[in-house]
Amino acid sequence: MSKERGRKVIVSNRRARHDYSILDTYEAGLVLVGTEVKSLRAGKASLADAFATVDDGEVWLRNVHIPEYEQGTWTNHMPRRNRKLLLHKGEIEKLIGKTKEGGLSLVPLSLYFKDGKVKVEIALAKGKKAYDKRQALAKRDAQREMSRAMGRALKGRY
């Protein structure tokens, strides 16, 4: 059996980029049980309401839904249990300092396999207000319209 290489995304949290402005990102490992990994290999997970917290010098991922493994027995896992994140001590201390400042949250952006191991990309994020979201939408629409106009101009269809 050959060793897996590269990055295979299981699930991404697109809503997080809409609701938060991302300040910094971190890659962390996850402490999982066997049936969770098998369920993730089947491509099943949800980061919809997920968030991370720092408790007693450890970072925990909460509200991630990994459904029970279909072929699992009594050893199956709880779908919404808290999962410990594996980060370096310096990164954890940095996160503690930043989240204590106020107004900053730890939000998971994606869950993926990297060289056969499950990783999560968490972001230090600040919540957007409603007007920030409208500005982002307007900017994206203007950018799309500019690229369409450029494409039409290049093709000779003003």
Image (cartoon, rainbow, N blue to C red):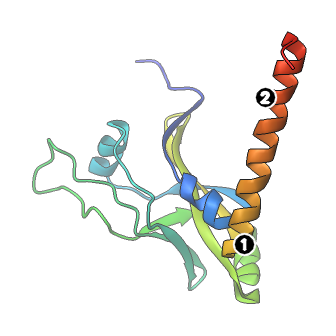
- Name the image quarter holding residue 74: bottom left
SS of the residue under disc 1: helix
In the image, 113: left or right of 67? right
Q: Position of residue 1 (x, y in %)?
A: 40, 18
Q: 48 or 128, which lies in front?
A: 128
| Rendering coords of residue 66 (x, y %) | 33, 55
- Say if residue 23 shows up in the picture: no
CA distance separating discs 2 and 1: 26 Å
Amino acid type indicated by mark 1: Tyr
Q: Is residue 39 visible?
A: yes
| Residue 85 rendering spot, x and y as whole percentages | 53, 64
| The label number, if any, that marks residue 131 in the structure image | 1
Residue sitting nearer the eye, 76 or 156: 156
The disc labelled 2 sits on which kind of residue? Arg
Give the secondary structure at mark 2.
helix
Residue at (24, 64) in percent of width and height: 78
Residue 47, horizontal then vertical, whole percent: 45, 58
Vertical placement of residue 157 versus 73, above or below: above
The label shown at residue 90 is: none
Sequence order check, earlier mark of 2 and 1: 1
Residue depicted at 44% across the width and 67% down the height: 49
Q: Which residue is mark 2?
A: 148
- Answer few, some or many: residues within 10 Å of disc 2's Cα (few below 14, many 20 plus, some between 14 and 19): few
Residue sitting at 63 percent across and 60 percent down?
A: 18
Residues at discs 2 and 1 in contact (Cβ within 8 Å): no
Closest to the observer: 152 or 31? 152
Residue 41 higher or lower than 104, as above or below: above
Count of marks placed on residues: 2
Q: Is residue 15 left or right of residue 74?
A: right
